[in-house]
Image: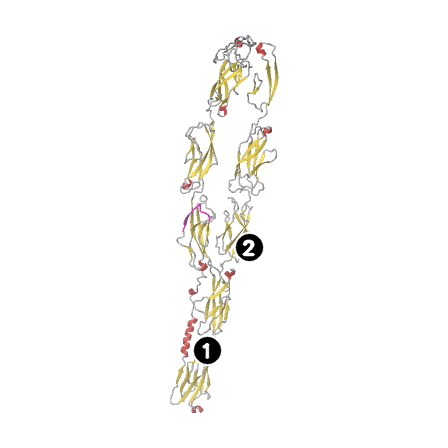
Amino acid sequence: MFSIHPTSGVITLTGKLDYSEVALYEIDVLAVDRGLKLYGSSSSSSSTAKLKVHVLQANEHAPVITAVPLTPWNATRDPTYAYVNVEDADEGQNGEIAFLSIVAGDPLQQFKTFRTNPRSKEYKIKAVKDVEWEGYSFGYNLTLQAKDKGNPPKFSSAIVVRVRLPSEYTEAPTFEKNVYRVTLSEFAPPHSPVVMVKTVRKHLQIKYLLQFKMKQHQNPFIINPNTGLITTVAPIKAESVSQYEFDVVTSDRRAVAKVVVSISDVNNNAPSFQKSNYEASIAEHVPVGTSVLIVSATDKDDGENGYVTYSIVNVNKQPFVVDYFTGVISTAEDLDYETMPSKFSLRIRASDWGSPFRREAETVVSITLTNLNDNKPHFENIDCDVTVPRSLGVGEQIIVVSAIDADDLGVVRYRIDSGNNMNLFELDSSSGVLTLKKSLRDGDAAKQSFHRLQITASDGEMSSTPMFLNLTVVSAFKHVRSKCAETGVLRALAGLLLFGSKRHSQKEAEDEFADIHSVNRHTPRFIESTPTVIEVKEDLPVGTSVALLRAADSDSGFNGKLLFVISGGDFDSRFMIESDTGWLKVFEPLDRETTDRYTLNITVYDLGLPQKSSSHILNVNILDVNDNSPEFLQSDYSVDISEDTAMATDIIQLEAKDRDLGVNGVVRYSFLTKTDKFVIHEETGIVRVTGPLDREANPSFVLKVAAFDAAVDEPKMVSTVLLRINLEDVNDNAPAFIPQHYRIKVREDIPVGTLVLWLETHDPDLGLSGQVRFSLTDGEDGSFHVDKMTGAVYVSQTLDFETRQVYNLTAKAKDRGKPTPLSSSCFIHVEIVDVNENLYRPSFPFFVDWGAVSEDAPAGTSVMKVTARDEDSGRDGEVRYSIRGGSGLGVFTIDEDS
């Protein structure tokens, strides 16, 4: 393990120390006086000394890092992102860790390592300031390296610890808002969107649920558990509930948000009459403006939407008016039973003041006209001249008087007001028949031949204008004769009665009174050109209009006002439709790779009462765009191959998948790292060897591989991965001596066992292939030997210059590679150096010798010769000359031998 220089006493290390095997060496050193050899004297002395060599433990091992990443909650204060343990197998100070540092991956210097206690080998990675996660959606890859306290220190291999975003799995979710406030119109039909609630970071496992607080009311809302879109399921009435409050909770019950939906009152209620029909009666000829009755209607809407006014909407003019604001119906003209219908049917409309249209309702008011005794009887004939034979018998009829009363209330009565003083005539009060009561031949009657009767007709309340009946009694005639003036009252009354009869029987056509604004007759219908299939590119921005759905309704007003909703098929809330216009728009980003087709049920509602609707199926096909990069099946690839792998050998196949369709999903491969040793097949991703490999020149290759799609009309999408190719060693290098030839000089007097040469070789192979064993294949006479492990050459026998001056040795270095070890040789030229053994020194016969030379003598002229003698024999007696000093130094030269 150690050697000592024979003359200088310098001790040299010749082997590899191992503290774990031997920590202390005790060496005996022998010092011998050379006089023993020179003089053969037994009196030469020697001595020994004991040398203790303490082996200090070397810093053999580098620190080893083990990290356990953590994913803290967002809510955790001062979170720990990883626990790191650093071990060093050395003992003492060499095994102590000086520091653990972040050497890469923290561009914003947000993280730091902290030792858990002063002498602990456990560290925590913590943030020293608020971590910037935006732009680092995949977290941070921190590269750690440790240094020990050894001398010289050693560094650990660098390892990467990934710091992830705060976990969506463990962190309590939070909603984007604590309270969502929204105003919803009463017009909103079923399936109308209300509001979309979301957590700050949505995880697939989180679902949304509704919790209602208002148990006394039916809650007309549902929520899409996956997307958080709240929609209506029934019509909403502000007059029932003006505001809804409920909670949205996540399925894990760890987050809650309040939703407040205020219902805005709109004109969704028509006025409602207190009665379905009204009846009243009124006497004829009441003063114009007389109130008949009051109609009243109420509207549940607020403000102008609930303000009601009234009007008469009969097609034919009626002798009544209704107060616009109060609903009081009064007469507009003089009423006459005889000339007007006896019963009036008024169509009264109540209208609110809502917008964009008024809502209206109608009722029927029946008014019966009461007949009054407002006409006096009128005689048909007046001023009658009647000739009565005197022989007319008692009781016989003379004439019939007739009066007509336009009122149809009672019987006309007749009476004789004057001219019947003798009581000769009798007038039937009911029939108007005038008969002879007493004979005209007897008594005073026989003497009188002319009578003038005044007759009046009465209906009980009113009397007619009297008529006069002139009776002339004659004896020449046997029959009564009369002649009267006609008044024409019969014809006039007949015409009046005929007109009144027509008025009494007059009815208004129902169709004429039908209110086109109030009756919702027609169902909305989608027009024929409405699309049934549309195609939408998946990269359309949110808010883009994709289709116009059009519908028509033949009704007018609210009955023809249309609203559109998506009533089914949009299970992940990707679309919305403008309720007024029918424009279908993108509501949330589309992803064909998730859903490539939607079948939407579009429903159109009118605002009539009752509300009517119809539906239309719209198929939406999502078109692919090149929005997905190819994804390698592994995050990185590594392959070990032998360095003697033949060219054209396939060594690994890389594979990437692209979720896009068509050419957008066709993957092509290429190397981004320039290399002439490997090639990758563009279509299959198979990597092939194309050049000779040499592990000793390049033990590994790190190639950056790109996978790109074959998009034509869109930019290509690319992803990359690292491919590490490690070359496995083969025994392809023989040990090489450094240098190839050794020339050394060895003193003849060095003791046996002295180290004279250290052979050095280099074998770049690994393992056994790089382990070298030494030997001397031509050791001459065995004077030298070599340590097979270290290559140290030692003296094996005593050397003698006088016996042999040169040794030519051949050394062989051979590795332990398999199956065939490799070897090489080198030549060692050993020259033995003579050690001065003579006893006598050379001497000149004279201390001073004289010579002369001409000053013009040319260079090289012989001047003189000096001679010295040596009493030793052999080589020890050979003399060599030289000029060592004096004023002639550099002027004269002396021949070394002569």
Give whichever of 773, 494 is nearer the camera: 773
Q: CA distance from mark 1 to mark 2?
A: 68 Å
Q: What span is colored magenta in the figure?
A: 531-542
Where 535 falls versus 57 (above or below)?
below
- Nearest the camera: 889 or 78? 889
Q: Quadrant of the N terminus?
A: top right
- Dot 2, how many residues are within 10 Å of its Cα: few (below 14), some (14-19), or many (20+)? few
Q: Closer to the camera, 114 or 249?
A: 114
Q: Which residue is mark 1?
A: 375
Name the spot of residue 811 as percent of width and height, x first.
Answer: 49, 18
Mark 2, residue position: 216
- Residue 223 in the magenta stretch? The answer is no
- The vertical placement of 461 against 309, above or below, is below
Compare marks 1 and 2 and give the one earlier in the sequence. 2
Q: Position of residue 833 (x, y in %)?
A: 52, 14
Residue 536 is covered by the magenta coloring: yes
The tally of labels here is 2
Q: Secondary structure at mark 2?
A: loop
Which residue corresponds to the image point at 38% horizontal and 89% vertical from the top-left?
Answer: 476
Q: Marks 2 and 1: in contact by CB < 8 Å?
A: no
Between 551 and 407, the one lying in front of the other is 551
* Residue type marked 1: Asn
Q: Position of residue 306 (x, y in %)?
A: 51, 61
Q: Residue at x 48, y 54 (%)?
A: 190
Report crowding for label 1: few under 14, some 14 to 19, many 20 or more residues within 10 A (C-alpha): some
- Residue at the front extreme of this rendering: 855
Is residue 543 at all visible to an observer of this figure?
Answer: yes
x and y, in percent, of residue 580 in the image:
45, 55
What sort of colour scheme is used for the picture?
secondary structure
